[in-house]
Every structure is written in structure tokens, then in C-alpha cells.
Amino acid sequence: LAGGCATRTMFDEVMQALSWYFDGASALFCCAYSRILSFGKKEERMMQITRRLGQLAVGAAIVSFSVRDGLFENFRKHNFKSTMSTLGTTYCQSVCITSDDELKKRALAVNTAALADADKEGIRVMNAELRPIRPNSKFVGIARTVQCFNDYLTVMKALHEASPGEVLVIDTQNSTRTVAGELFATESMRRGLSAIVLDGPCRDTEQLSHMDIPVYITGVRPISGTSNKIYQTQVPVTCGGITVLPGDWIVGDSDGIVVCSRDQLERILPTAESIVRTEDRLLEGMRSGKSLLDLLNFDDHYAGVQRGSKNSELRFNETSAG
């Protein structure tokens, strides 16, 4: 860049523009950085930091060459500083991590089926035995994990330490006695938790079926566990046949529960949102009298599979949508 600047004045002007650019970007990036530090695994945190710094560096390069080549000539006299600062802010907004609230809102707007379809090989899906007590349950939250066996004392500890928006994920290690019921669900609601996922039996299901907090269980038994043993919290657990880590994002609805890292959820959400939009258009077309097969490239895809094609995919036929 220095070699490409014809004069020292031009070089100084590029450096000043970069200074204003990073003035605008720094505050937003600090917010993103603080959220990155809350991620569970060190490797994932470092990957996020490296990615965001790289993206900001690309923006800085674009600003540098644009200023050098005179693309901001009209702004030089009056609002050059404001323009550079705004560019930094805008670019940082485009690369910074989506806020937790925004991510939760978007995840609630799709369904677990769309999320699973968006990443069939990578997303973790809990087994079918875990079912919601209340019909039409739906939640999104961050995992707070618990291990126990026929004893609920550690569940109480996790509940005491839980924060609003978290999901209590309980690995009962094949307990035959219940470790949660109406009292714990009521306390979870009071603390603002998003849901309880209990890989084991539960009781007080009649009361729980009328409560506003989703509770997923594998069975029902009236006898409770003891309260005199200490197990672990905020450790990797097995729940619904998969590994759940503290800080994982959990999404549940009537179809089941999916689990992924925050970065993975942010990455697959656009695909899941696109799937929902496509399915909505398919349903709209069928309600207007069109055949599902006509709305898809079924004939071409079926023929491709018959030929042994590895590249053929079943897709929405835009031309048939009308």
C-alpha cells in the first residue's frame, strides 16, 4: 500500500482514514469480543476471533485502496471523518456476531425439522424417547448441564446457578427415580429458564402440562430420588443419546430437540430459513390445486438417480410455482 501511494500526503491520508475506520469499528468489535469469550470451547473462541479480525482486515484493505484511488473524493472537504467512521461501524456490524436475542428470535421462527435439514450430517438430534409434556412446546436456549443418579440435590444446585434463557439439561444416567417435578419447574419459570430437558422419568405431569415452561422427559414415575448425593454440573453430558456441552444451543419443538454450537447455529440459520420459505411456497401451491411433484423437479431428479448421477438434487421448481 505504501508503495502504491504517490506522495507522503496521500499515504498520511490513507492512514488517517484507517484510523477513523477503526474508531467506528472498535466499540462494536469489543461487544462482539465479549460475546465470543462466553463461548464454551477455547478452540471455537479462537476461531471466531481470528475470523472476525480477518474480516475487519479485509474491510480496512478496501478502505485503504479506495481512499488511495480517490473513490471518496467528494467527502474529503466536509464529512470525510464521519464517512470513514460510519464505514467502520457498518462493516463491523456486517461481520460481528449476531446478538443472542436476535439469534434466539430467528431460531424460534424456524422449526427443528428445517434446522436438521440444513445440516443433516453435523447437527446433533436427541432420540425420539424425549417428548414434551405439554403439546406444541417450543423453545430456544443455552445448555446448563447436570449429571445425577436417582438423586436431585445436584439438580437443585444447577437450578440455583442457572441464568435466564438457559435450558436445564439433566443426564440422569438411567435413573429409575424422578429428579424433577412441579416444584423445580415452577422455580425454573421464576428464574426465567427456557426449558427443562430431562433424560429420565418425571412426576407431577398433570400440573406440568398446564405450565408455561416446556419440559421434555422420557417417562413418568411417581417416586422421587434422594437428596444426599453430589454429582457434577456444567460438564459434558449424555442426553437423548447425544453429547451436550455447557453453552451449547438447544432448540426444541413438537418434533424433538436439536443441539449445536452457537457458531453452527448462526451458520445454518440462513439455510433453515430458506427451507421454511420454500416449504411455505410448496404448501401454498398445493392448496391452490397444484401437485407436489409438479412443484418439484421430481421427474428430472428421479431420472438422474436412475442414471447413477451423484449431482442430482430434489429442488423446488420455480417455474411451476406460478
Image: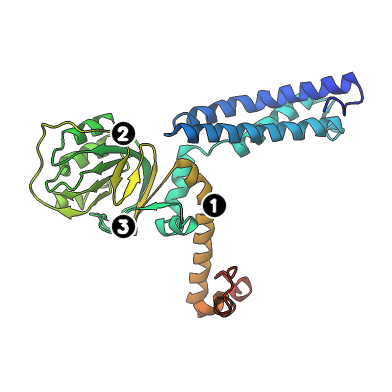
Label number found at residue 234 = 2
Closest to the camera, between mark 1 and mark 3, is: 1
Which of the two labelled residues, at mark 3 and mark 2, occupies the earlier sequence position?
3
Percent across and percent down for residue 166 are 34, 38
How far apart in space, not on screen, are marks 1 and 2 (Cα)? 30 Å
Q: Report the amino acid beneath label 2.
A: Gln
Percent across and percent down for residue 9 are 88, 19
Report the residue marked by disc 1.
Answer: 270
Q: Report the amino acid beneath label 1.
A: Pro
User: What is the crowding at mark 3: few (fewer than 14 residues within 10 Å), some, or many (at least 20)?
Assistant: few
Q: Report the amino acid beneath label 3.
A: Asn
User: What is the crowding at mark 2: few (fewer than 14 residues within 10 Å), some, or many (at least 20)?
Assistant: some
How far apart in space, not on screen, are marks 1 and 3 (Cα)? 24 Å
Report the residue marked by disc 3.
Answer: 136
Q: Quadrant of residue 322?
A: bottom right
How far apart in space, not on screen, are marks 3 and 2 (Cα)? 28 Å
Cβ atoms at labels 1 and 3 below 8 Å apart: no
Percent across and percent down for residue 309 are 59, 73
Q: Is residue 245 above or below residue 157?
A: below
